[in-house]
Amino acid sequence: MVFADRVDAGRRLATLLSGFRDLAPVVLGLPRGGVVVAAEVARAMGAPLDVIVVRKLGVPFQPELGMGAIGEEGVRIVADDLVRRCRVAAADLAGIEARQRTELERQARLFRGDRLRRPLAGRTTILVDDGIATGSTARAACQVARAHGAARVVVAVPVAPPEAAAELNAVADEVVCLFTPRWLGAIGQYYRDFSQTSDEQVVALLGAERAEPVRERPW
């Protein structure tokens, strides 16, 4: 399965999520690319859209390989076995985490501006990304959503390896995925257009959503 771009992936993913519409969910995109997918899901469901800011902790010599992730509210996940296998020193891990914490705080300020975070208490929360490799970032996002009182946490992605999707069931109430290839490779190979999403695009999507009335059920 190959998607034209993140918009196409979001529209296709929304078809699998239609059953959640009556639960008045909040849709949260993981920046940056996940917000583009999430915007299409939220639009199709008539649900409010927000961002959930998490940052991957990449292995020093292979940054795309996540050895953990951090999120708002002090959430921190580290795959100790991977850290040991890659021989990442404690000082290197601390340095990576400090840099990513700075970027996390910058993104949270930039993407939300003066807007309040969407309240999650007692609600179904759908966490959307443009794909999952190891699942560490999505796990952190689940913990952040629960820290804000989400009653039900659903992870929804266009593509993920079966083992990562299965492991997410330990922290999410449900995982929805369009395609689970046995050998994942790079997320980008499942998109014809996987160009980088800019901060400005994320801000524009979130701002446009707040400017339009959300057609959700009263809560």
Image (cartoon, rainbow, N blue to C red):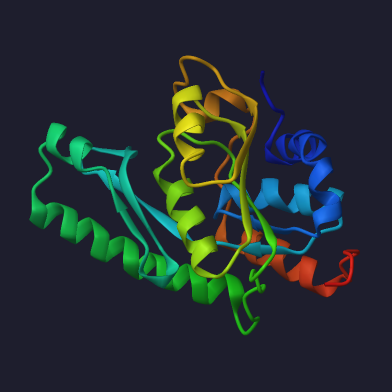
Q: Residue at x 44, y 72 (%)?
A: 106
Q: Residue at x 58, y 70 (%)?
A: 111
Q: Residue at x 54, y 17 (%)?
A: 181
- Assign the C terminus to one quadrant of the image: bottom right
Tell me where residue 107 appears, x and y as whole percent.
Answer: 48, 68
Q: Quadrant of residue 122?
A: bottom right
* Figure check: 18 above or below 118: above
Q: Residue at x 50, y 71 (%)?
A: 108
Tell me where residue 7 appears, x and y as whole percent.
Answer: 74, 41
Q: Nearer the viewer, residue 167 or 4?
A: 167
Q: Nearer the viewer, residue 198 or 141?
A: 141
Q: Residue furthest top?
A: 182
* Figure check: 3 above or below 142: above
* Figure check: 192 above or below 44: above
Can residue 192 be seen in the rendering of this structure? no
Q: Is residue 144 left or right of residue 213?
A: left
Tell me where residue 35 appears, x and y as whole percent.
Answer: 64, 53
Tell me where residue 121 appears, x and y as whole percent.
Answer: 64, 71
Q: Nearer the viewer, residue 40 or 155?
A: 155
- Assign the N terminus to one quadrant of the image: top right
Q: Is residue 28 left or right of residue 98?
A: right
Q: Quadrant of residue 203?
A: bottom right
Can residue 188 be seen in the rendering of this structure? yes
Q: Nearer the viewer, residue 13 or 166?
A: 166
Q: Is residue 157 left or right of residue 48?
A: left
